[in-house]
């Protein structure tokens, strides 16, 4: 009697968890493997598999799928289909002319589009997390930094379901969502993910997309000031004069902008190049030319400099400008937008003995850690 009532209670708990919609152990992330602009016309899959298409199922060891006139054709079969599904019986290899090799062992769905064939891989959440980690952080970094990045990857994955609903999947495999590795993943990434199984950053009951950058340069950015996650606040990255990311090759940099450079960025005759506004961490949020009405925000300035000079000259908006006879010496710190976790800082904290929880608390103080069973 007592056992049955316990079972009943467990059943009710399971129902409540399922109803919450974000708490399922078997969550699968539908990953669009290839960029919509570069879809292959032909995909060849090799390995033991069961193929399903047009109401039929059969086993195969090699299969070529070709996009033609808005539908798919299986080579050697000749019949047109609107979808082909593959259930691998071990790792299968996908070859195309436009994308690197992919080796996966999960359900794959192929669909036609006007541009070619799209493959949607149904990847279990924890495997997705390991595959993202393998692309987003060097795997020879300290284990606590890898574990922190794993939680960032899982949180962003959980918060990104249906982000690409219009394309027929949840997330893409590019930086727009998170980089995704489609080749077998190193055991190092798998171990970092296992150490943090289920843990994600959340605000209230919801997982959050957790932005991160390569090197903050001593202060992270105020997300709200640059139109990103406004709950990500500017934090000093370690004790004054001893930033956690100080060993990064991008920690400090200098460049000289000539009058011609500045005119190219502002797209008008050059005036005195000045900083107009900074965020609470000192990052430039608006720059302009004295005597000219035009001014641009920090993110736009960074983007224009990158497009004009390449991405190695002005690396971040944590910078100061010094006028020097017809040119400007720009001294800066860090690389990237600076919002959220500083990856090189996470490495520095891990080297100083901090845990992945302490690293996440430092960079995401306005979020809490929750476990998604
Ligand atoms: Zn995306
Ligand atoms: Zn940093």
Image: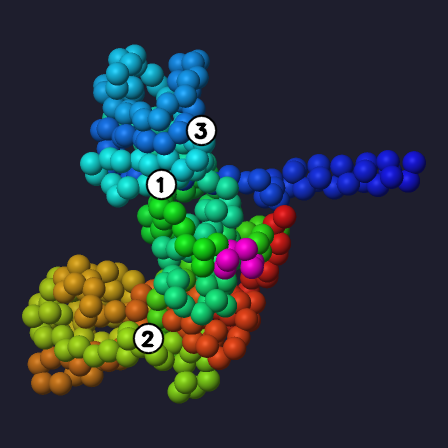
Q: Is residue 293 visible?
A: no
Q: Is residue 199 left or right of residue 338?
A: right
Mark found first going from the N terminus, 2 or 1 = 1
- The span from disc 2 to disc 1 (Cα, nearest Å) is 33 Å
Q: Is residue 2 above or below residue 152?
A: above
Q: Is residue 46 above or below residue 229?
A: above
Beta carbon of the mark 2 residue lies under 8 A of ligand 2: yes
The quarter of the image holding the N terminus is: top right
Indicate the secondary structure of the residue bearing disc 3.
Answer: strand
Instruction: Assess whether mark 1 and mark 2 are in contact (beta carbons under 8 angstroms).
Output: no
Rendered image: mark on residue 156: none
- Closest to the observer, 6 or 337: 6
- The span from disc 3 to disc 2 (Cα, nearest Å) is 44 Å
Mark found first going from the N terminus, 3 or 2 = 3
| Neighbour tally class for label 1: few under 14, some 14-19, many 20 plus, Cα within 10 Å | many
Residue 22 percent coordinates (x, y): 59, 43
> Residue under circle 1?
103
Q: Is residue 104 above or below residue 262?
A: above
- Closest to the observer, 136 or 49: 49
Residue 373 percent coordinates (x, y): 63, 48
The magenta segment? 191-196
Identify the residue at horizontal 30%, vertical 69% (top origin). 335
Instruction: Assess whether mark 2 and mark 3 are in contact (beta carbons under 8 angstroms).
Output: no
> Residue under circle 2?
248
Identify the residue at horizontal 36%, vertical 44% (top origin). 182
Residue 239 percent coordinates (x, y): 46, 84
Identify the residue at horizontal 31%, vertical 25% (top origin). 63
């Amino acid at each position: 009697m007592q056992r049955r009532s316990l079972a009943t209670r467990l059943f009710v708990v399971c129902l409540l968890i399922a109803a919450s919609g974000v708490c399922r152990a078997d969550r699968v992330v539908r990953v669009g493997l290839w960029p919509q602009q570069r879809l292959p016309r032909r995909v060849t899959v090799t390995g033991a598999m069961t193929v399903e298409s047009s109401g039929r199922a059969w086993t195969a060891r090699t299969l070529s799928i070709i996009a033609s006139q808005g539908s798919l054709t299986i080579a050697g079969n000749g019949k047109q289909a609107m979808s082909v599904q593959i259930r691998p019986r071990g790792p299968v290899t996908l070859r195309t002319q436009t994308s690197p090799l992919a080796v996966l062992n999960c359900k794959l769905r192929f669909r036609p589009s006007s541009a070619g064939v799209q493959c949607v891989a149904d990847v279990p959440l924890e495997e997705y997390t390991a595959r993202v980690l393998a692309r987003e952080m060097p795997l020879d970094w300290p284990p606590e930094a890898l574990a922190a990045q794993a939680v960032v990857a899982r949180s962003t994955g959980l918060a990104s379901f249906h982000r690409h609903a219009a394309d027929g999947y949840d997330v893409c495999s590019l930086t727009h969502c998170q980089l995704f590795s489609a080749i077998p993943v190193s055991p190092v990434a798998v171990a970092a993910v296992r150490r943090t199984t289920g843990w994600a950053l959340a605000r209230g009951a919801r997982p959050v997309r957790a932005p991160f950058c390569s090197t903050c340069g001593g202060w992270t950015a105020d997300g709200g000031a640059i139109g990103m996650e406004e709950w990500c606040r500017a934090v000093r990255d370690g004790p004054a004069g001893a930033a956690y990311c100080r060993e990064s090759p991008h920690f400090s940099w200098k460049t000289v902008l000539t009058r011609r450079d500045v005119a190219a960025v502002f797209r008008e005759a050059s005036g005195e190049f000045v900083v107009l506004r900074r965020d609470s961490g000192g990052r430039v949020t608006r720059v302009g030319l004295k005597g000219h009405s035009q001014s641009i925000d920090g993110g736009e300035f960074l983007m224009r400099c990158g497009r004009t000079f390449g991405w190695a000259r002005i690396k971040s908006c944590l910078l100061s400008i010094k006028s020097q006879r017809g040119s400007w010496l720009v001294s800066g710190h860090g690389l990237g937008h600076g919002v959220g976790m500083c990856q090189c800082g996470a490495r520095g904290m891990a080297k100083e003995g901090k845990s992945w929880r302490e690293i996440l608390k430092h960079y995401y103080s306005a979020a809490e850690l929750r476990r998604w069973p």
